[in-house]
Image: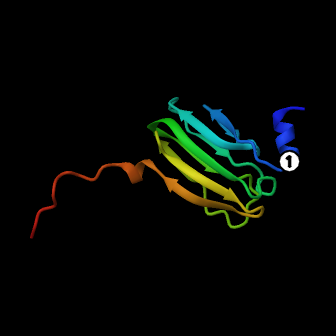
Amino acid sequence: MSTEKFALEQGTVTQKEQYFTAAGQINVRSGRARVSNTSGASFEITLPPVAQAQGRFYSILATAANGTSSITISHDDDSERWGGDITLNGAGDRALMYSDGKCWHTLSLLTYADTTAPPTTAAPQV
């Protein structure tokens, strides 16, 4: 019996990692998605079906991005109250998603805009 099959029968979660360089859908058994976009063309990564992913967390990380093309994280058109697609456009951008079986919840989101250094020049004083 395979280790994965044994783990599933015992009710434990096996974490798998998926790598994307083009559009695709995250497998329900994957816990981590690593996305690289240096092609200059934007593309979309779709979360697994919300009901099948119930109780699971998904970590999505942009490992490489050129800042001009985006990676869009979307749902499978099955989540209640979907808050809108998530855009990652810088290396290091990441999202942590959770499914309660009916709705996707964005637990954490860090994007390039959050990590850009503030200007070093002070505003003129009046």
Locate residue 23: give its quadrant.
top right
Q: Residue farthest to the top?
A: 39
> Does 124 appear above or below 89?
below
| In this picture, residue 23 sits left or right of residue 78 | left
Locate residue 35: give its quadrant.
top right
Q: Badge 1 local density, few (<14 within 10 Å), some, or many (20+)? A: few
Residue shown at the point (11%, 62%) measured from the top left: 124
> Does 126 appear above or below 86?
below
Locate residue 90: give its quadrant.
top left
Q: Quadrant of the N terminus?
A: top right
| In this picture, residue 51 sits left or right of residue 94 | right
Residue shown at the point (67%, 57%) measured from the top left: 98
Q: Quadrant of the C terminus?
A: bottom left
The location of residue 61, given as percent across then percent down, is 55, 42
Residue with the mark numbered 1: 10
> Does 15 appear above or below 125?
above
The location of residue 36, given as percent across then percent down, is 55, 33
| In this picture, residue 63 sits left or right of residue 48 | left
Q: Amino acid at mark 1?
A: Gln
